[in-house]
């Protein structure tokens, strides 16, 4: 038995020695053929190392983060940020808005490049039709008398040039005619007298005739008087122009004094349209420019005229300046007093950086343009605007030529409050009391939002405000108190009911204006139980 066991042990040792030598030989050959190759491990292959998740950032660019997945008040998922991510994949700066490319396509976001162009625009101004002041004639006798007879006795009647208007009787006129007739007869009787007598009588004739001319006696009447020597009791006044009788004060039998205006006749073959141009458009108006006028009474007709004068005064009540347009009035369609709409085509020859009008978000105090930095990333920029056309507006400062600006995005209307909060990050990011400590467990940067827990006391849906009795807030060093918050949008009001215990996140949009960006109901009422006992009113 011992000898058999010894034989078995020897055989096993021999096999082991041979195997070892064979393995060493093969290893040596492999080393000779591939001297630089590393020795391969016989274990499982290595798997790619997953980057470390840092935190989740707000999809709308608000300066708040979360250590766990969550949704914003609009139902959009927070975006994950990993360690070692490039600048393009990391969280945007606080004044940028980020949206996933899928949502960009779904929401219909459209961008257009800012371009250099000349602005062509139409100035619209309301006005009224007025008679041409240079075509108005007043009939006013220069002597005292009485209206003997009226040939034109209604206002609005058309009269031709030279048409009789009325006849007057004046003792002064009769006396002047007698003097002239006597002077003429005396000059005729002195033809054989010496030259000095003839010269004196001639001067008397000339002065009598000049007196009649100064009273606007027509040449025809004077010739009749000279030829016949007959003194006429009345004198006829005729219309000096063709037009419409726009004023008639003469009444048959009435007495008038020198200078009384008895008739006014207006030539309406050409009229004025005096339009009130707003102060901001006045710099584009030039005399000689062609204007188009539309009249409510004739919607199918378009009248054309020319700007002839820009008045030097401004109406302080309306901040407008009158502009005069002269135009023909064929057929007398345009009547004084009619309302008119003037359209003036103007253009600026100099080119300027322009963006579509729809790209500008006007808050009343400043104008904002959303610049698309890359797909899904937008930056709100405050811009300074210049001239406008019907479709484009000049950007003096804030946007450069070629930059993409958002011109169509329905989500901007729905997320107006969130967008304003993002814009508020310009100043809020640098405010010391706007920064809150990073959420527990988050390795990313500190959030600019603040957290509080408390009980909803009052909700005002019209003003979008809510009153909450909250506990102490360490990030702001606030004690427990009751204060009023604004909400980012109407959707948040649905979760805020009086008596509900909630956990809220909020940011300071403007100094002293605190806006709730998210709300979570508290399942455990004990979490807010300590609030009620320590709350005091104030802030």
Image (spheres, rainbow, N blue to C red):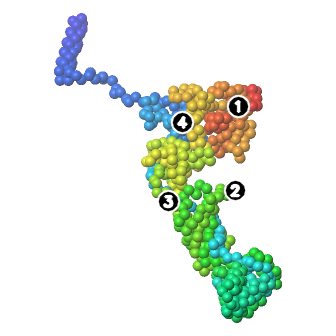
Inter-mark Cα distance, 1 to 2:
50 Å
Residue assigned mark 3: 347
Q: Which mark is residue 470?
A: 1
Name the side, left or right, on which 389 lies relative to 229.
left
Q: Are marks 3 and 4 in contact (CB under 8 Å)?
A: no
At a point 75% along the width and 84% down the height, the residue shown is 176
- Residue position marked by numbered label 4 in the rendering: 94
N-term mark: 1 or 2:
2
Q: Earlier in the sequence, mark 3 or mark 4?
A: 4
Question: What is the spatial separation of the Cα atoms under label 1 and label 3, in whole angstroms?
Answer: 59 Å
Distance, label 4 to label 2, CA atoms, is 44 Å
Mark 4 / mark 2, whichever is N-terminal: 4
Discs 4, 2 touching: Cβ within 8 Å: no
Residue 253: x percent and y percent? 82, 84
**375 or 458, nearer to the observer:** 375
**Which residue is situated farthest in the front direction here?**
194
Give 534 or 262, whichever is nearer the viewer: 262
**Badge 2 element:** loop
Characterize the local packing of mark 2: few (<14), some (14-19) or many (20 or more) Cα atoms within 10 angstroms: few
Which image quarter holds the N terminus? top left
Q: Which residue is mark 2?
A: 317
Q: Secondary structure at mark 4?
A: loop
450, 218: nearer the viewer: 218
């Amino acid at each position: 038995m011992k000898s058999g066991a010894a034989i078995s042990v020897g055989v096993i040792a021999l096999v082991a020695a041979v195997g070892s030598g064979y393995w060493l030989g093969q290893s040596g050959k492999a080393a000779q053929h591939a001297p630089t190759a590393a020795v391969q491990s016989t274990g499982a292959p290595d798997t790619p190392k997953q980057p470390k998740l840092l935190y989740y950032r707000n999809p709308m660019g608000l300066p708040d983060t979360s250590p766990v997945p969550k949704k914003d008040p609009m139902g959009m998922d927070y975006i994950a940020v990993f360690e070692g991510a490039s600048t393009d994949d990391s969280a945007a700066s606080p004044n940028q808005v980020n949206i996933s490319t899928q949502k960009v396509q779904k929401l219909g976001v459209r961008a257009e490049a800012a371009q250099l162009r000349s602005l062509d625009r139409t100035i619209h101004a309301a006005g009224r039709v007025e008679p041409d002041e240079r075509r108005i004639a007043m009939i006013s006798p220069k002597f005292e008398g009485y209206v003997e007879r009226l040939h034109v006795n209604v206002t609005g009647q058309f009269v031709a040039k030279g048409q009789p208007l009325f006849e007057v009787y004046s003792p002064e006129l009769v006396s002047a005619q007698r003097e002239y007739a006597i002077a003429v007869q005396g000059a005729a009787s002195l033809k054989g007298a010496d030259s000095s007598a003839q010269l004196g009588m001639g001067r008397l004739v000339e002065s009598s005739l000049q007196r009649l001319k100064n009273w606007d006696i027509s040449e025809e009447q004077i010739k009749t008087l000279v030829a016949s020597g007959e003194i006429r009791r009345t004198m006829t006044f005729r219309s000096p122009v063709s037009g419409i009788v726009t004023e008639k004060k003469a009444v048959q039998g009435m007495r008038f004094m020198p200078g009384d205006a008895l008739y006014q006749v207006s030539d309406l073959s050409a009229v004025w349209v005096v339009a009130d141009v707003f102060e901001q458009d006045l710099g584009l108006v030039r005399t000689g420019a062609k204007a188009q006028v539309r009249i409510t009474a004739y919607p199918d007709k378009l009248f054309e005229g020319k700007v002839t004068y820009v008045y030097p005064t401004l109406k302080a009540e309306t901040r407008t300046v009158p502009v005069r347009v002269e135009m023909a009035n064929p057929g007398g369609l345009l009547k004084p007093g009619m309302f008119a709409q003037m359209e003036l085509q103007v253009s600026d020859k100099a080119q300027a950086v322009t963006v579509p009008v729809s790209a500008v978000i006007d808050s009343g105090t400043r104008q904002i343009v959303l610049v698309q930095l890359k797909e899904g990333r937008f930056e709100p920029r405050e811009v300074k605007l210049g001239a406008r056309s019907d479709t484009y507006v000049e950007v003096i400062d804030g946007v450069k030529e070629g930059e993409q600006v958002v011109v169509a995005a329905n989500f901007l209307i729905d997320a107006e409050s969130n967008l304003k909060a993002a814009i508020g990050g310009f100043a809020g990011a640098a405010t010391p009391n706007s920064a809150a400590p990073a959420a527990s467990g988050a390795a990313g940067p500190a959030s600019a939002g603040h957290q509080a827990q408390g009980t909803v006391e009052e909700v005002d849906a019209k003003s979008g405000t809510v009153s909450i009795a909250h506990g102490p807030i360490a990030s702001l060093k606030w004690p427990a108190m009751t204060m009023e918050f604004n909400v980012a949008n109407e959707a948040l009001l649905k979760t805020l009911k009086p008596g509900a215990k909630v956990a809220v996140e909020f940011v300071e949009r403007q100094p002293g204006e605190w806006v709730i960006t998210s709300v979570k109901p508290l399942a455990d009422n004990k979490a807010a139980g300590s609030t009620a006992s320590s709350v005091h009113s104030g802030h």
